[in-house]
Amino acid sequence: MRICILYDCLHPFRVGGAERWYYNLALRLAAAGHQVTYLTLRQWPKAAEPTIPGIRVVAVGPRLAYYGRRGNRTIAPPLLFGLGVLFHLIIFGRRYDAVHTASFPYFSVLAAAVVRPFARFRIIVDWHEFWSRPYWAKYLGTLGAIGWWVQWLCLRVPQNAFCFAELTASRLRENGVCGPIEVLTGEYAGDLAVGSPAIAERLVVFAGRLIPEKRALLAIEAIALAQQQIDDLKGVIFGDGPELELVRQAIDKYGLGSSVEAPGFVDQAVLDDCMSKALCLLHPSEREGYGLVVIEAAARGVPALLVQGEDNAATELIVEGVNGFVALEASPEALAENIVRVHRAGRALRNSTANWASDNAGRLSIDSSLRAVLRNYRI
């Protein structure tokens, strides 16, 4: 089949759950013999075009800053990406059997909808998240009403809808998405049957984009409190973004310079090595559509600590006391308490986390999702 994937970011130039989903999906589709074109915005120097085996990468827009000073997404990249997608599909749309797009940034969905009557490709939309009206208002203020309306327009596009959590599926149903919904449970591309996990060090790891909703600053406060009960506890804040300097300032503010570091963006091998020996993954994000990093931690026998929230679907991946804990409130005290609980649980919790990952390998693997995706392409 001839498949066109639409997402404004491309791994490894930008790192995140959705980026890795589309990168791994594209690789597997190409390996299965399908013709794959990946439309994105440019994130690389013009003299260093990306080469991904079996995938044609097309930049339909320039290199831009994705985030403003407050850590919110800026409007220019989604608009320009939508226009670039529109022009590309007008010219080349008949070459594709299926167009597979992320719901966000929404203008790519609308562009595909405009061209489909003429090009006759199938539209598949991944809803990594569905934002509620209150969250739109919180994120954009008075402009949140416009964001909600654009999201609502995307619901009206006839589509096969994929999502990655029951939370998102219920919101799609409640708001009347125009097409069938299927929940994909697997995004992990590695091996989940890892056997005996490594011995834990007194180390707490945070890994994520440093934007306000990931709440890295809260993680630092929690580590500082937990150090009062766990001798020699250390922390690493992995990630880059608009809050990187604030994170480093917070480390200095709490006097953690000798025990907590924020190295920014690092190679995957460095992150993997640190994660495998971590006591726990501290992931206090208020908004997650899936929570791939929770699976990445569990694959190494590392329990995850999350925070309950109406927009946090990652909590669906936690079995309390088996592969981690979920704090009922976003406070440093609640998170510190759970860090201490993990420390006291010791080896038994690491083993149960690894067993949970192994027992759920079938549904958490990206291969299970790939089978569902291919089935929808052919309908």
Image (tube, rainbow, N blue to C red):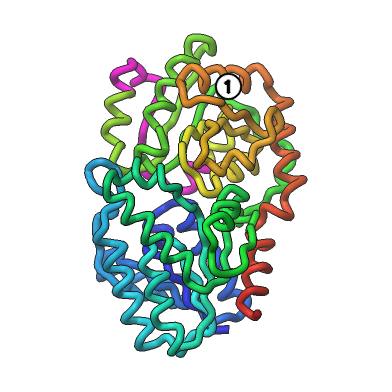
* Percent coordinates x, y for residue 262 in the rendering: 36, 33
- The answer to whether residue 315 is above or below residue 257 is below
- The answer to whether residue 268 is above or below residue 304 is below
Q: In what quadrant of the picture does the N terminus appear?
A: bottom right
Q: Badge 1 is on which residue?
A: 338
Along the line of sight, the residue nearer the viewer: 34 or 82:
82
* Percent coordinates x, y for residue 266 in the rendering: 40, 44
Evaluate whether residue 222 shows in this view: yes
Q: Which residue is located at x 52 percent, y 49 percent?
A: 289
Q: Which residue is located at x 54 percent, y 68 percent?
A: 178
Q: What residue type is labelled 1?
A: Asn
Along the line of sight, the residue nearer the viewer: 369 or 240:
369
Extent of the magenta region: 251-272
Residue at the far top: name it: 228
Q: Which residue is located at x 55 percent, y 48 percent?
A: 290
**How many numbered badges does the structure rendering display?**
1
Q: Which residue is located at x 40 percent, y 62 percent?
A: 10
* Residue 275 forms part of the magenta stretch: no
Q: For the residue carrying disc 1, how many other residues have a C-alpha within 10 Å: few (<14), some (14-19), or many (20+)?
A: many
* Percent coordinates x, y for residue 269 in the rendering: 49, 47
- The answer to whether residue 292 is above or below residue 59 is above
Q: What element carries label 1?
A: helix
* Percent coordinates x, y for residue 98 in the rendering: 53, 79
Evaluate whether residue 53 shows in this view: no
Looking at the image, residue 165 sits to the left or right of residue 121; the answer is right
